[in-house]
Amino acid sequence: MKKGWPVKSIGELCILRPPKAEARSRLKDESYVSFLPMEDMGIDLKYPIPSKERMLREVDGSYTYFADGDVLLAKITPCFQNGKLGIAKDLRNGTGFGSSEFFVLRPNPVLNSEYLYYFLSRSIFREEGVLCMGGSVGHQRVPPDFLLSQQIILPSLPEQQRIVGVLDEAFACLATAQANAEKNLQNARALFESHLQSVFTQRGKGWKMVKLDDLTGLARGHNPPKSKFSYEAKPGYVRFYQIRDGSSDNHTVYVPDTPQLHKMKKDDIMMVAYRHVGRVFRGVEGAFNVALCKISNARRDLLDDEYLFHILPSHFVKGELLKRSERSLIPSMSIEHLREIQIPLPSLKEQQRIVKTMTLLSIGTQRLEGIYQQKQMALSALKKSLLHQAFAGQL
């Protein structure tokens, strides 16, 4: 920390919850003001944009008041952890109301609101805030005392503005780098999907269209009572797979091994049948719930396992399933839908040639995904480092 810079608490530098009487003294009941519900508060967006307006008399009772220049911070889980934070700007009549789950901080004249915004953006602030949360599960909140007791170094206003300028420029560059990395990843995925589409659309000589029901065994899962769930493996229990388990083991569940369970083997393909219809995974053993569908290759003399795994997420299968459920609020599929879908079926030799090409493209796409994830981690670490330096007087 630079010598001579004082350290103050947020409570010494800010008013928490400016009084609604300000708005009532300046505006009539029929005056329009900006309205900002929690869902409109962005993440990594310095100036949220209220998309709604209400009359003062409609909002001045139960909603939180703020004005141009005030800093808003979500105090409830998971919005606090996600970093919902912003500075009020360009409000209708200079006045806004929003979620009762906002802290509103009004900096005094010696504290720049953008400087405060960046201070509250630090991951260490959120991590410490989570440890202090209180309340019932699902409705935990950061206490005001935690916020007001936070210590912040206070250089002169010109120095605060200089630090804000450095962070603005650096974060704009980081956002551009992140967007470029995301675009490269999307292009790689689009190339893979385009090739997949062309392979199955431009059918060669001798290809047939065959119903999935004639080539595979299909089965939906079974839901045992949640009261039987165990989050640890133990004798007499088997791993139980749900929709979320196709991409991670973060929510592992075990259930008693009973005859009522529907089970799969490692060479079975599991397809999501609800919400994320058509997503597939494999290589697992255990039981599965009703939101998953098991697809077993019943004709290996005609159908290659890898070819089946690649064609299921294509427009021939997933695309058809989504079309049939597009009028539903939440997409879902039935086995009857799946039975009737036809897929192009070349010779086994041609299937294996197609699989070889798709595997090479898949490896390339996964490599780019790995590079993207590494870049994301590096950019996140750099952002964290810059914020640390800024509020340690080292920027």
Image (cartoon, helix red, strand yellow):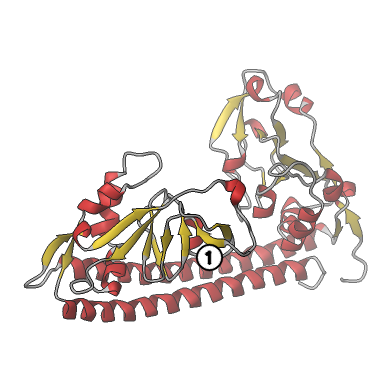
- Where does the image place residue 393, in percent across and percent down from the top left? 82, 69
Q: Quadrant of residue 36?
A: top right
Q: 106 or 315: which is nearer to us?
A: 315
Q: 238 or 137: which is nearer to us?
A: 238
Is 110 situated left or right of 203 in this image?
right
Q: From the viewer's perspective, is residue 294 above or below residue 331?
A: below
Image point (65%, 25%), residue name: 59
Q: From the viewer's perspective, is residue 384 above or below residue 348?
A: above
Q: Quadrant of residue 357?
A: bottom left
Q: 276 or 6: which is nearer to us?
A: 276
Q: Secondary structure at mark 1?
A: loop
Is 232 situated left or right of 290 in this image?
right
Image point (85%, 62%), residue name: 155
Is 186 situated left or right of 158 in this image?
left
Image point (52%, 70%), residue name: 177
- The residue where tag 1 is placed is 248
Number of numbered callouts drawn: 1
Amino acid beneath label 1: Ser
Image point (78%, 42%), residue name: 135
Is 366 situated left or right of 171 in this image?
left
